[in-house]
Structures are given as C-alpha cells and as structure tokens.
Image (cartoon, helix red, strand yellow):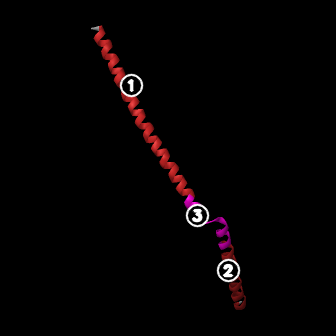
Amino acid sequence: MTEAIVSGAVAIIAGITALTNRLHSRINTVHARITEIDRRVDTFELRVVSSYVQKSDLEKTMAKMEEHMDRIEDKLDKIIMKNV
C-alpha cells in the first residue's frame, strides 16, 4: 500500500513538473515573439520619424513663418497708428 502511494505521489509530481515545464516553454515562446514585434515596431517608428520631417527643415519653415507674422504685425501696427 505504501509503495502505491509513493508511486502515485511521484507520478503526480512528475506530471505537475511536466505541465509546468510545458507552460514555461510556451510563455517563453510568446515572450520572444512579443520582443521581436516590439523591436520591429521600434525600428519602423524610427524610420518614420527620421524621414517625416527633418529638424533643420522645420526650423527653416518656422523662421519663414515668424518673418511673415512680423510683417503682418508691422502692418497692423501701422493701421492702428493711422486710426489713433
């Protein structure tokens, strides 16, 4: 009787161990896939950001807009000064 209980306990422990190993293996596979997808998304984001707008181009455009806004402001100031 004792031998049957010990054999049963060993079988149960071995079964639980096998299930645990299989579960961890699947978790590691999913984790590897997620890591690869994350790396690919990061690479894509970097390519999009670097080719979307260069900082120097944005600075040039903003400088032109500021010059234009200054001219509009000067014109508005002249109109206000005439009406005062």
Which labelled disc corresponds to residue 17? 1
Badge 1 crowding class, 10 Å Cα cut-off, few under 14, some 14 to 19, many 20 or more, is few
73 over 30 or under it: above or below: below
27 over 42 or under it: above or below: above
15 over 52 or under it: above or below: above
Badge 3 crowding class, 10 Å Cα cut-off, few under 14, some 14 to 19, many 20 or more, is few
Q: Amino acid at mark 3?
A: Ser
Q: Amino acid at mark 2?
A: His
Please give the count of numbered marks on the rendered protein: 3
The verdict on residue 50 being magenta is yes
Residue at position x 54%, y 54% in the image:
43
Q: Position of residue 71 (x, y in %)?
A: 70, 82
Q: Is residue 45 left or right of residue 25?
A: right
Q: Are marks 1 and 3 in contact (CB under 8 Å)?
A: no
Mark 2 vs mark 3: in front: 3
Residue 83 vs residue 56, the one in the foreground: 56
Residue at position x 70%, y 79% in the image:
70
Q: Position of residue 76 (x, y in %)?
A: 68, 85
Q: Secondary structure at mark 1?
A: helix
Q: Position of residue 78 (x, y in %)?
A: 72, 87
The residue that mark 2 highlights is 68
Residue at position x 49%, y 46% in the image:
36
Part of the protein shown in magenta = 47-61
Q: Are marks 2 and 3 in contact (CB under 8 Å)?
A: no
The residue that mark 3 highlights is 51
Mark 1 vs mark 3: in front: 3
Q: Secondary structure at mark 2?
A: helix
Q: Amino acid at mark 1?
A: Thr
Residue at position x 55%, y 61% in the image:
48
Q: Residue furthest left?
A: 1
